[in-house]
Image (tube, rainbow, N blue to C red):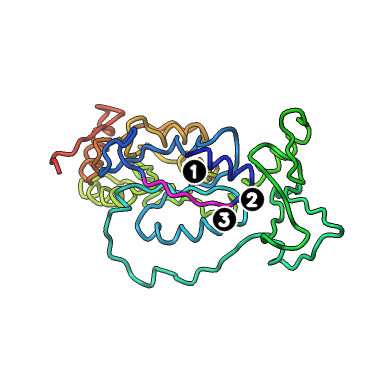
Amino acid sequence: MSEALGAAAMMEIPVVCINVQRAGPATGVPTKTEQGDLWQVLGAGQGDYPRIIVAPTNIVDCFTLVPTLFNLVDKFQCPGIILSDLLLSEGRSSIDPDELDFSVPIDRGDVIGLNGDGPPVNGGFKRYLVTDSGISPRALPGTPGYVHVVATDEHDEDGVLISDEFTDPHKRQAIHEKRMRKMDGVLPLLPAPELHGATDAQVTLVGWGSTEGVIREAMQQLAGAGIVASNLQVRWLVPLHADAIVSILSTCRKVVIVENNYSGQFARYLRSETGIAADGHIRKYDGEPFMPHHIVDGVKAILAGSTKLYVPVHEIQV
């Protein structure tokens, strides 16, 4: 139902969707994991619209990112997507209870009725007021003087439709640019990814989402074999900290991207946003998650020059 995401964006309604990826296409292998939905969520819905996409790297992330994303979509009045996978959703982990915050501050953003604003003179509430930030103050339903009507068609600042015979190119452009400006304000609020490990490592393993744990374990095994590896794990996918990623990877000796899909969806996305083409790829799409030795064997093969794409398969049927 990806049309609902576009509808929320057009009407500027905050909504959080959780995509737990499994092996596809269609119902695929319903009980097995994969990272194959990245391009789906990047393009879900018609047209261009602001969206925030985050991929939790572990089970604690699954807990903490939900309220974080709720606050962000409330503030920026746009859809947000948590791109998890079956490995995390059905996984188990021992964690310190102190890592879990049950008293997270709630930030509803600029809401009339909560921000102290009074009723406009003679009504005149412009729900989609064009602002420099792209964020238009919304109102609590039922607030006197702040009634608005909107549909999934394009509209002006008042919410009046400008489609069909009332098309107005100038208003369409202005309101479209208003929505997209929101993304400029999102990025500074998100933590940029940081390199884990030595800056002069022989190989840098780039992953996203749930591959963090197995990559870190593989790094330890590689160290035992005399190979120094580092890891750049990307959590916030949209908007992407492209400049920070370029700054880190441009100094790395060899970049290898690790992901649970056939086509290298993150590798393609990273190249489109940064221009960085990886030196090697380790991909798995048999329905099972990576084991550390799969990554270790892949790194050794890539460093030896025997392949640029290493595709392991689970040795044991489960």
Q: Split into 4 quadrants, where in the image is the C terminus?
A: top left
Q: Which mark is residue 72?
A: 3
When the figure is inspected, residue 294 is found, relative to residue 66, above or below; the finding is above
Say which of marks 2 and 3 sits in front.
3
In the image, farthest residue toward the right: 122
When the figure is inspected, residue 77 is found, relative to residue 32, above or below; the finding is below
Q: Position of residue 60 (x, y in %)?
A: 37, 61
Mark 1 sits on what residue?
245
Q: Position of residue 25 (x, y in %)?
A: 33, 32
Magenta residues (range): 14-20
Instruction: Name the amino acid, label 3.
Output: Leu
Q: How many marks?
A: 3
Residue nearer the viewer, 237 or 281? 237
Is residue 17 inside the magenta stretch?
A: yes
Mark 2 sits on what residue?
185
Residue at (43% x, 38% y) in the render:
38
When the figure is inspected, residue 75 is found, relative to residue 237, above or below; the finding is below
Chain-order first, disc 2 or disc 3: 3
